[in-house]
């Protein structure tokens, strides 16, 4: 009972903080907001004790044999600053959508890779992660006129989720809620069969019932299989896409060449092989840009045979 009460209080405070900052940032010039953003994040950083603890544990799991504690602490702090600035940017750009096309850009070859995947005329399964300001990346592709759908987990706060959905709809952002599961699968397959793009984030912990365990930074990690299943069912190409901070207030989108699911003797082996392949791609980007990933998630929480 006490835990539930505390959780409700935290959720209410988070909701009102969201409402306040959304209103507050609407009143200020953009340059001033970015000038004070580092200060706001610095003030918030010490308050998120549990998130910092989880992030430190995750970073240690991934890099304990490769990086010093000082290096790990540096990544942890940079990760929080990137996350905080990312939220501030989302507040600002939702209110000033014309800036999205100015603050983001495609890396050389990315537009061609995207167009080549679309030209296959089989729909496109985009795969990405909670990496960089991925929400802005999806808004940018929507602004360019691409029919992008994204599978998202709805907020636990129904009132905030209603606000999120209103903003997404206003900006033409097509979202597919991750549950009910049957509805999510049906809507995703429908979008692919009408030759559109469905983006799936494949870096969140899941258990063995709804995913498979693959190697991730040398540890077994329960990983969702949805993207691979969609590509298996529709024959759609798989398209890795990521975004990284490129300068103080701008972002670079990197889209790799598409590939097709590699079939193995059984469906189980096909799932295992291809989920591992995609996870390797995600790990490669995290290794290259470690401060861009959300380390404050218990990625290795589920264990095989648990």
Image: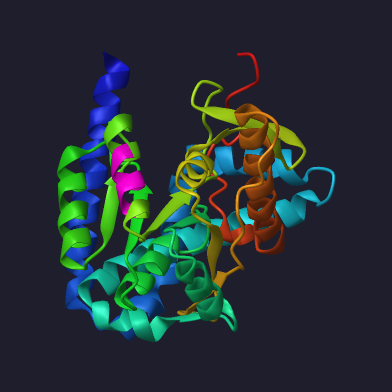
Magenta residue span: 186-191
Q: Residue at x 30, y 48 (%)?
A: 190
Q: Quadrant of the N terminus?
A: top left
In the image, residue 78 lies in the stretch drawn in magenta: no
Question: Relative to 271, is 88 on the left or the right?
Answer: left
Q: Residue at x 50, y 39 (%)?
A: 229
Q: Is residue 193 above or below residue 111?
A: above
Q: Residue at x 30, y 76 (%)?
A: 143
Query: Where's residue 304, x and y in %?
Result: 65, 20
- Assign the magenta stretch its main secondary structure: helix
> Which of 297/212 is in front?
212
Q: Is residue 294 above or below residue 134?
A: above
- The answer to whether residue 40 shows anywhere in this view is no
Applied colour scheme: rainbow
Q: Residue at x 68, y 51 (%)?
A: 283
In the image, residue 189 lies in the stretch drawn in magenta: yes
Query: Where's residue 33, x and y in %?
Result: 32, 77
Q: Quadrant of the C terminus?
A: top right
Where on the picture, by quarter, is residue 258? bottom right
Question: Relative to 111, is 14 on the left or the right?
Answer: left
Q: Is residue 203 above or below residue 244?
A: above
């Amino acid at each position: 009972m006490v835990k539930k009460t505390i959780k409700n209080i935290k959720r209410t405070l988070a909701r009102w903080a969201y409402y306040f900052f959304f209103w507050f940032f609407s009143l200020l010039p953009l340059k001033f907001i970015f000038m004070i953003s580092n200060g706001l994040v610095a003030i918030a950083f010490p308050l998120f004790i549990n998130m910092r603890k989880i992030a430190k544990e995750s970073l240690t799991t991934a890099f304990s044999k490769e990086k010093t504690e000082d290096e790990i602490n540096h990544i942890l702090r940079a990760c929080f600053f990137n996350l905080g600035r990312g939220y501030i940017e989302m507040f600002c750009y939702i209110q000033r959508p014309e800036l999205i096309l100015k603050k983001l850009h495609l890396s050389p070859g990315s537009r061609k890779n995207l167009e080549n995947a679309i030209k296959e005329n089989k729909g496109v399964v985009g795969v990405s992660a909670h990496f960089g300001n991925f929400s802005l990346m999806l808004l940018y592709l929507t602004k360019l006129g691409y029919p992008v759908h994204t599978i998202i987990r709805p907020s636990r706060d129904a009132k905030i989720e209603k606000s999120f959905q209103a903003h997404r709809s206003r900006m033409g952002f097509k979202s597919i809620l991750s549950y009910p599961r049957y509805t999510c699968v049906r809507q995703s397959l429908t979008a692919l069969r009408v030759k559109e793009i469905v983006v799936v984030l494949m870096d969140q912990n899941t258990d063995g019932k709804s995913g498979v365990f693959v190697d991730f930074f040398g540890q077994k990690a329960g990983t969702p299989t949805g993207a691979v299943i969609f590509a298996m069912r529709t024959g759609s190409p798989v398209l890795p896409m990521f975004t990284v901070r490129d300068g103080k207030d701008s972002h670079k989108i990197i889209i790799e060449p598409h590939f097709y699911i590699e079939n193995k003797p059984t469906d189980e082996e096909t799932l295992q092989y291809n989920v591992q392949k995609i996870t390797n791609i995600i790990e490669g980007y995290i290794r290259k840009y470690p401060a861009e990933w959300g380390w404050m998630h218990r990625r290795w929480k589920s264990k095989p045979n648990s």
